[in-house]
Amino acid sequence: TVDVRVSDNGRSHLSELIISVDAYVNGVHQTTTSFLISSNINTDNYSTPISINWNDWLIDAENRISFKAIDYAGNEVDTGYLFAIRKDTLSPIPSINLSFSNLQQWYRVSPDWFLAVDVDFIDRGGAGIDRIKYGISKNATTPTWIYISSDVHSSFSYTTDWSINWASISDGINEIWVSYNDIVLNKDLMYLFTVKKDSVAPTMGYRTPTNSFNLNLSKWYSAMPPSWSFVQTIISDNIGFSSLNSLTYIVSANGGAWQKMVLLTQNVPYNKYQFNETWAISWNILTDGINEIIISASDGAGNQMITTPVYRLLVDRVPPSVNVSQNYFTGRAFNRWVNTDTLSGYPLSKPYENFDVDFSDNL
């Protein structure tokens, strides 16, 4: 209530008492409205306390109050500006200036636009913005809030680009929210967008033991063994959640560089987090000698796993060679029929001893 006392000294008595409200927003005059407090007063004095109608007389602004009294003779008196009531029942609002074209993809590192998020905040009621923060929510949990600014104080807008802390984003699907309030604690929050983060490479949790499918890794082979068509490897992407994308095995021969790549599968469906199928080692790409096999897997965010050698396959398709020398006793004891135990003075056993025959494995 407001205690306003009015007296009429001209004897015609008071007729009306009026309140005037001049509304200013950010110091700029907006409207002037008047409301009748009392009519047909018909006394020389008015001292009834006046109640301000919060809902009907005041708007969200700085409301500057004055009073005017009129007597029955039409004489008027105006108090002029007495005081102001600053009413603000409106929360600030965000102004979003973002392009959301890349929000469906998975990220393994922070995108550049995380460093300059162009979402502004505008005060509507006149009190001024106080605090702004963004929140990160995963799996519909209560957001974890991080302040953008906690000392805006009386500013009617906040237009500085702000950043999102990548380290605060968990692997998986994260919702980004903003919360904002003004000085008189009008507050609101808004969902902005979803960020998909996967910073963890796929993992290989299991490979076929040497006794499964009779996969003998210490034996040399000259032909493709059946067991090499039934290799089983479990590749998982159940930590980072962007799902598997491509799987490859790579062959290195005799300690050389990784030189031959074979695609096991590409573009595994995005809802597939695990590859648990048998696959065949291609015999035709193996080199004679020691072949080491590594596994490479990538996920939807571009994280890549490259293992150390998981299989060591021994291949030898080159037969040994034979080199026979007949220089010794050529033409004397060979290719002849004999019926004696001596040949030209030599014991029969001599020509048939110490054959010069060499064997070599060309691998």
Image: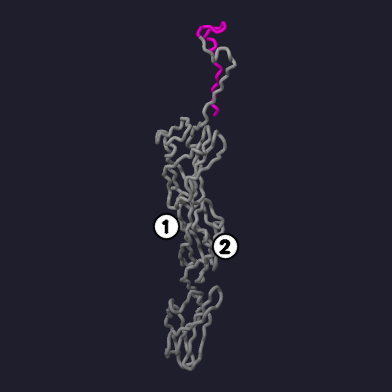
Q: Nearer the viewer, residue 15 or 249?
A: 249
- Circle 2 crowding by C-alpha within 10 Å: few under 14, some 14–19, many from 20: some
Residue 53: percent from left, percent from top:
43, 78
**Amino acid beneath label 2:** Thr
Q: In this view, does 292 lie above or below 201?
A: above
Specify the segment rendered in magenta: 339-363
Q: What element carries label 1?
A: loop
Name the N-terminal-most of marks 2 and 1.
1
User: Residues under labels 2 and 1: Cα distance?
Assistant: 26 Å
**Residue 131 to residue 270: above or below:** below
Is 118 located above or below residue 73 in the figure? above
Question: As drawn, which residue projects farthest toward the top?
Answer: 345
* Mark 2 residue element: loop
Instruction: State the residue at coordinates (42%, 47%).
Output: 274
Residue 160 disc label: 2
Name the residue that disc number 1 marks: 142
Residue 340 in the image: state x and y as whole percent. Answer: 51, 7
Q: Which of 12 and 117 is in front in this view?
A: 117
Q: Position of residue 238 (x, y in %)?
A: 43, 48
Image quadrant holding the C terminus, namely top right
- Closest to the observer, 109 or 334: 334
Q: Residue 207's quadrant in the figure? A: top left
